Amino acid sequence: MSLTLSLTHDCNLRCSYCYAGRKSHRAMTRETMRRALEWAVGYHKEHRLGRRFVLGFFGGEPLLEWRLLQEADTLAERLCRDAGLELGRTVTTNGTLLDEAKAGWLMERHYTLGLSLDGPPERHDRFRRHADGSGSYAEAVRAVRLLSSYREPCPQFICVVRPDSLESVPEAVRHLASLAAFPIALNPDFTAPWKPSDREPFRRAYGEVADFYVDEWRAGRPLHVTWIDAKVKTLLMDGYREQDRCCPVRRELAAAPSGNLYPCPNLVGEDDRADLRLGDVFSGIDAEALRKALSRCGSSVPACKSCPVAPRCQNWCGCANWFSTGRTDGVSPFQCFYEKTTIELADRVAETLLAEKCEPFLACFGDFIQVAAPEVAAEVSGAARSPSASLPQPQPRGSRAAANAAARPAIP
């Protein structure tokens, strides 16, 4: 189970596409934080939801509530230790408040960071600005440099994609790859007004990203773009695993600053969506609200049932569905296009690199290839044992050598 604490509705930036709603000085109290963690860890243990409990921080900007974040970490560590659970940690941040001390504290505790950075200065500062209108690129890049000095755990870039920024997506990916060997998440803004006329520019932009991905692997510079990695795995494994899919409470839950509970941190917003609430940290889960939420998991669109790529489609993502259609079980035409296009492009990537027997790629996805294509895995394994076998020498990329990235598993 993953519990994300939305520590505050406030933020030091005013990003033009923010879906978290109006900014206000409403922060979670220590008592609410304590009740949230005590309830969630107890629920996790009581319902035997696995050996690992994941604590996440979201906002607003969670680093605005740094002291509360640290106190929550200490409490979660104690509660999980007493319950015999392993504790995982995540935080999503714009990076502008990160300094050397905070970066060191987070990395020493093995936090997985999602760092919002939209590409080069002109692209990033167009969308991610301070309240006074000034850009935030320089501060975000300072955070990248701080985090790049740590080998593990590896942060992830979060780059938002909108209809009005499609043409610059390939440049953004190249720029991010030059900064650090962090995985790159290209997250479509599903609140945006996507039109049929956006489809060809989208296909062209994402096609260029796929080509760049192939070129980097060929050159011995492993590049991780999360939608490509994920769709390649679904190709090799014939779809998403059950544990990959959203499931309120059993796999994911978010607490608003007020203590109200939601299926996902993306759905907290201004904490005014009563139809999405699942209860609160003081009285627990509302059984009827949970029943309704579970009944609306996955797509209710009839065409999805017979779609040949349904096992590889994320039509089960409740927050993307809700932002696109106003229903957690609805799927918009753009979502359908997005899924089919990313599957098609990822398949092209995989078929190209598998056909070429690209050794770094095969080594990275080896566990999946072993299951899906054992004959390929056996051939590669034999080649790797040969005295003459050698991998291409990686070229440095950004502030961290690509050789370090090759040692890390792909991000699901």
Image (cartoon, rainbow, N blue to C red):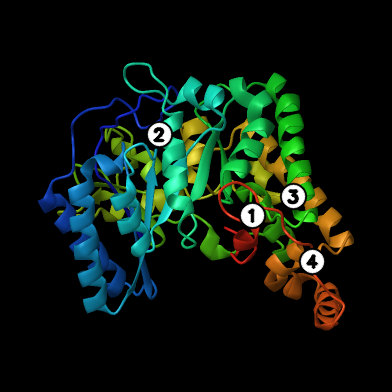
Q: Nearer the viewer, mark 1 or mark 2?
A: 2
Q: Toward which corner of the image does residue 45 lie, by quadrant?
A: bottom left
332 on left or right of 238: left
Question: Cα distance, mark 3 to mark 4?
Answer: 13 Å
* Residue at (65, 61) in percent of width and height: 403
On residue 27, which mark appears?
Answer: none
Instruction: State the residue position of label 3.
Output: 216
Label 1 sits on a secondary structure element that is helix
Question: Cα distance, mark 4 to mark 2?
Answer: 37 Å
Q: Quadrant of the C terminus?
A: bottom right
Q: Mark 3 or mark 4, which has the lower sequence index?
A: 3
264 or 367, which lies in front? Answer: 367
Instruction: State the residue position of label 1.
Output: 230
On residue 359, which mark appears?
Answer: 4
Question: Cα distance, mark 3 to mark 1?
Answer: 17 Å
Which percent across, then down, holds residue 151? 49, 61
Instruction: State the residue position of label 2.
Output: 139
Identify which amino acid the numbered label 2 is placed on: Glu
Q: Residues within 10 Å of mark 1 (few under 14, many from 20)?
A: many
Identify which amino acid the numbered label 1 is placed on: Ala
Q: Mark 3 or mark 1, which has the lower sequence index?
A: 3
Residue 83 seen in render: yes
Q: Nearer the viewer, mark 2 or mark 3?
A: 2
Which percent across, then down, holds residue 333? 65, 31
Identify which amino acid the numbered label 4 is placed on: Glu
